Amino acid sequence: TQFIKRSYDVTCVCVSFSQVSLSGLKPLPEKVKIVEVGPRDGLQNEKTIVPADVKIRLIDMLSEAGLPVIEATSFVSPKWVPQMADQEEVMRGIHRKPGVSYPVLTPNLKGYRAAVKAGAMEVAIFGAASELFSKRNINCSVEESLQRFEEVMSAAREEKVPVRGYVSCVLGCPYEGSVSPSRVAEVAQRLYSMGCYEVSLGDTVGMGTPGGMAAMLEAVMREVPVHALAVHCHDTYGQALANILVALQNGVSVVDASVAGLGGCPYAQGASGNVATEDVVYMLHGLSIHTGVDLPKLMDAGSYICRSLNRRTSSKVAQASCKL
Amino acid sequence: MGNVPNAVKHCLSYENLMGESFRLPSSFQEKKEMVPTEIKIQLIDMLSQTGLSVIEATSFVSSKWVVQMADHNEVLTGINKSPHVRYPVLTPNIQGFQAAVEAGAAEVAVFGSASETFSRKNINCSVEESMQRFEQVICAARQACIPVRGYVSCALGCPYEGQVHPAQVTKVAKRLHELGCYEVSLGDTTGMGTAGSMAAMLRAVMAEVPIHALAVHCHDTYGQALANILTALQMGVSVVDSSVAGLGGCPYAEGASGNVSTEDVVYMLHGLGIQTGVDLAKVIEAGDFICRALKRPTNSKVSQATSRSQPSFNMCE
C-alpha cells in the first residue's frame, strides 16, 4: 500500500504539459470528459453473461467513482444481444447520481420507444464508415442505417432527448481494410447535422496508429466542430493510449473507455478490445488533466466486475497496483 | 504530430539483460526458469535477421548475482554476429569489462540510477561510487576503442523513493555523457511515468545532453509505454529501447508487465511513417519462438492480435 500511495503521488505531480511547445500541436485540454462504456459495450462483448443485479451494482459503483457519463445498456433486440436482455430491469434498478448521464443504445425507432418507456433520458445511435461493416453488422447499407436514425432523431428532438452518435471503423475495417478519412468525415457530418450533440469516432478493430488518428481527425474537424467530437479507441494492437494522446493534442476532450478494459475484440479471438478506463485516467491525471474520476474507486468497480465475470482485468494500472 | 523524427534506431534488449535483473530479490530469481544457452543464441540469431540494428546480448555481471546470465561467454561466442548489427553487453565494473572484451564484446553498457536508494539497494553502493566504477570501465573502453552506452534507471520514478526530480536524472545523464557514453538511455524502471512526467524529464535532460545522444527505455507496467515513447519522439528523441514479446516482467509488481514489446513499438512507428529498417513479421516470429521456449504467452498485443485474427462476427456495436 505504501508503494500504491507513492505511485498516486507521482501521478499528481503538477506538470504543465500544455506549456511544452510542440510545433503544430494545440495545448492539451484542461478537462476531459470520460464516457464509460463498460456496462454496455464492455459487457456486451464478454463471453459470460452477468445478471441484472451485478450490472446495476457495477453502474452504481461507477457513478460513485465520479464518471460523468455511463452507457448503461442497449435497447437492441435480445435476439441479437442476449447480454442486454435485462435492459428494462437495469434502467429501473440503477441509482441515478445527479449530474451523471446514463445513455442507452437505440438502433431504431422501436428500440428508442422502449428505451424512453424504461426511463432513458439520453440515447445513442451507431453508424459505420465502412459499407461492408454496416451490411455485415446490421444487415443494411450505411445510407439505410442513417435513414433509420433520422426516425430516432425526429422522435428524440420532439421529446428533447439528447442523442449521441457513433461512427465505427474510423481507422480501419475488419472487412475492407483501410478506410478513407473523408468517408469518416462524411458519416460524422451526417450524424452531427441530423442532431447528434456529440459524435464518437471508434477505432473498432484497434488497428489505428497516431498518424492515422491525426489524419482522420483533420478530415473530420473540417466538418464537425472539435468540441462535439469524442474518440473511442480499442487497444487490440496496444495503440490506444498513444492514439488518445494524439486526439487530445488535436483538441479532442471527450474519451470513451471501458472499466477493466471489458469487452474483447470480436475480430481477433482472445485479443483485447476496449481501452481500460483506469489506464486512460492514469495517463490523464499524469498530464494534470481534470477528469473528476476517483481512480481507487474506479479500480474497485473494475475488481468487482472482474470477480463477477471470473476474469482477469485488462487494465495494466489495476494489475500493477493490486499485486504489490 | 510534433517534430517526430523520420527514422528511429531501435536498441533491443531481452529478458533478464537489464541491470534490474541483478536487483531481483532472491525469491524472484528462484522462481525464474533458466533459459538454455542454445535458446538464447537462437533468439539472438533470429533477431539479427529482423533488421534491428542493436541487440543487447548478455550481461557480464557476476553469476553470483545474476545466475541467468552465467553463460555470457558461451552466448557471446556462440551467436552469428551480423555485420549490420551491434551486440552491446552489460559491464558493471572493470572485471566485467575485461571478461566481456576477452569474450569478444565490441560494445558495452553501464547502468547508473537517478535514485540514491535504488542504487544502494540494487548494487550496494551510492550513485557517486557507481560513477567511479563506470569511469574505470569507460577509460579502459576508450583505450580499447570500445563504445560505451549509459543507462539511467528510475528516470520517471523510483520504487523506494517515489517521485524522482528531473534534476536528479539530468545530473546522472550528464555525468555519464561527459564521462564518455556515446548515448544515454533514460529508463522508466517501474513504468509509472506518464506523458506529462516524460516531457518534464526530457525538457530538463535535453538542456544538458544533446538530443541525438538520448534514448528512452519505457516499461509498460501501467500501460503508459507507447504514449510515453510517442511523447519522446515528438520532442526529438530517435532511439527507443524495447524487448521482443515484452519479455521481462516488472520485479516490483509480481505478475505485472515490464518491458514494452518491440512488436507494439514497431507497429506504432511504422504507422507513423517512421523508418526503422525492421521487418515486423520476423520480430513476431522471434517473439513466438522465445515464448514457446519459455512456455509463456507473449506480452505483445500486436502479436496476440495478428496470431488470432478471424474476421467472423455480427452485431458488434
Image: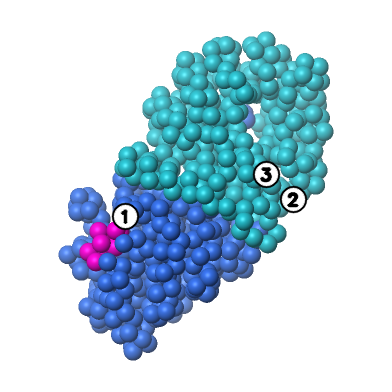
Dot 3 and dot 2 residues touching (CB under 8 Å)? no
Residue sitting at 73 percent across and 37 percent down?
A228
Chain painted in blue in the figure: B
Residue of label 1: B293
Residue of label 3: A252
Dot 3 and dot 1 residues touching (CB under 8 Å)? no
Q: Earlier in the sequence, mark 3 or mark 2?
A: 2
Quarter occupied by residue A111 = top right
**Left or right: where does residue B142 sit relative to residue B61?**
right
Quadrant placement of the N terminus of chain A: top left
Part of the protein shown in magenta: B117-125
* Residue B231 or residue B104, whichever sits in front: B231
Quarter occupied by residue B174 = bottom left
Q: What is the number of callouts on the image?
A: 3
User: For the residue marked with disc 1, what is the amino acid?
Assistant: Ala
Residue sitting at 52 percent across and 22 percent down?
A59
Mark 3 lies on a secondary structure that is loop
Q: CA distance from mark 3 to mark 2?
A: 11 Å
Chain ID, mark 2: A
Seen in the picture, residue A167 relative to B112 is either above or below; the reply is: above
Q: Position of residue B311 (x, y in %)?
A: 58, 40
Mark 2 lies on a secondary structure that is helix
Q: Position of residue B314 (x, y in %)?
A: 61, 30
